Image (cartoon, rainbow, N blue to C red):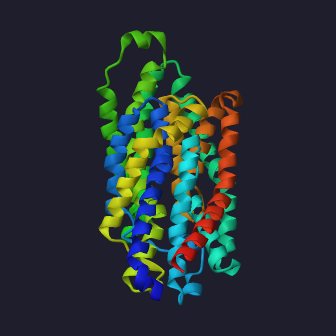
Amino acid sequence: MEIIAEHGTLLLILAAVFGAFMCWGIGANDVANAMGTSVGSGAITVRQAILIAGVFELAGVILAGAQVTKTIRKGIIDPGLVADQPEILAYGMIAALLASAIWLLIATAKGWPVSTSHTIVGAIVGFAIAGIGMEAVHWNVIGNIAASWLVSPFLGGLFAFLLMHSIRYLILMTDDPYKNALKWAPVYLFLVGWIITLISLFKGLKHLKLDINFQDSMIIAALVGLAVAIIGRIMIARLKFDEEEAKKSRFYKVEQSFIPMMIFTACAMAFAHGSNDVANGIGPLSAVYSIVTSGGAVAQKASVPVWILVMGGVGILIGLATLGYKVMQTIGHKITKLTPTRGFSATLAAAITVVMASSTGLPVSTTHIAVGSVMGVGLARSVESIDLRVVGNIVLSWLITLPTGAVLAIIIFHALKASFG
C-alpha cells in the first residue's frame, strides 16, 4: 500500500505510456488483419483502409469499447492472491503491456499476423508465475487457448472454402456471370449485414450490457441485413464499367460488383474490432488505474474513463497508419492472390466464425481466423496457389507468441520490482 501511495502517479503514467504503445501494436497488427483482405483484393486502398478504420474503429471504441472492462483479462490469474500487495499486480500489468507491445512491434516489422489476445495472455501468465506463483494461473484457460491455434484457422478456412465454392458455382462458372452476380449479390449482402450485426450484438456491444435476447438479436440482424442488401444492390446497379476491360475478361464486371460488398464488410469489421479488441490494450491499464485511484484496492472490474478509451482508439489508428501496411501485405498478397470475390469470401468467413465462437464461448483468435480464411480461399483454387513458406512463418510466429510474451514480461516485472523496491 505504501508503494502505491508514494509512487501511484508514476505507475499510472508508465501504464498509460505502455498502454498507448500496446494499442499502437494492436492497430499495426490486429486492425491490419481486418483490413488486409479488403486492401489485398483491390477493393480499397491503404489510405481508404485508414480512413474507414479512423471512423469505425473509433466509433466502436467510444460507443461500445468496454464501459466496464475486466481488469484481469479472461480470468487468466487469481487476483485475490495479491490483495495485500497491490503493487505486485500493478507491476505485472505494466510489465504485460510493455512486453506485449515489444512483441507486437517485432512481429509487425516482420509482417507476421499474430494474436494480440494471446500476446497479452502470455505476458500476464509470465508475470503471474514470476510474481505470485504457478498456482495463480488458471491453466485450463491456457489449454483452451492452445487448442484454438488449430480450431480458429480450421473453421475460418472451412467457411471461406465453402463460400468461395458457392460463388464459383452460382456466379463465376455460369453462362452469364454478371447477370448471376446481380441476382445473388443481395443474398450475400444480406449475409454481411446479418452476420456483422450479430458480431456486434453478441461480441462487440456486450460491454454496454444491453438486454437483448437471442430472438431479438436475430430480428435486428435480419432487418440490418435487409437494409444492407437494398443499399448494396443500388450501389452495384450504379457502377460504371470500363468496357475495354470487360471485353478482356468475362469476370471483370463480377469482380467490380463485389467491391461495394467488400467496403460494407470492412466498415462493419472495423467497428466490431474497435468495440472488442481494444480491451487487450486498455484492460491492464484500467487495472492499474483502478488500483492507483482506489489507494490500493484490487478489484475484479473497473470503470474505464473516457480518456483511456480515446487514447486506445487513437493509438490503434496511429499503429495502422504507420506500420499496418506490413501485415496487410502478408494477409492481402503473400499467402495467396486475392480478388474482390476471394477477399469477400475470406472476410465473410472470418465474420461467420467469430459469431459462432462468440455465441458458443469457443476460445478463438480473430487473427488466426483471418489467416485461415485466406488459406481456405486459396485452397478453393489449388494447394499450389498458397505460399506454404509464408504460412509456415506465420504458424511459427503463433507458436512463439505466448512464451515470448511470458519471458519478456518476467524480465520487465523483475526490473520494475527492483526499481520501486
Q: Is residue 123 left or right of residue 309?
A: right
Residue 296 point in image, percent of width and height: 44, 86
Nearer to the camera, 229 or 372: 372
Pinpoint residue 89: horizontal percent, then vertical percent: 53, 78
Can residue 387 be seen in the rendering of this structure?
yes
Which residue lies at the image location 39% right of the left edge and 67% below the top edge? 66
Q: Count the numbered circles shown.
A: 0
Question: Height in image: 204 above or below 140?
Answer: above
Which quadrant holds the C terminus?
bottom right
Q: Residue 244 versus residue 69: which sits nearer the camera?
A: 69
Residue in the image at 35% along x and 36% along y: 48
Residue 1 in view: no
Q: Judge whether 362 appears above or below 44 on screen.
A: below
Q: Quadrant of residue 74?
A: bottom right
- The quarter of the picture where residue 92 lies is bottom right
Residue 164, x across and y down, in percent: 57, 34
- Image coordinates for residue 138, horizontal then vertical, percent: 65, 75
The structure residue drawn at horizontal position 37% and vertical position 46%, both measured from the top left corner, is 53
Residues 98 and 212: in front is 98
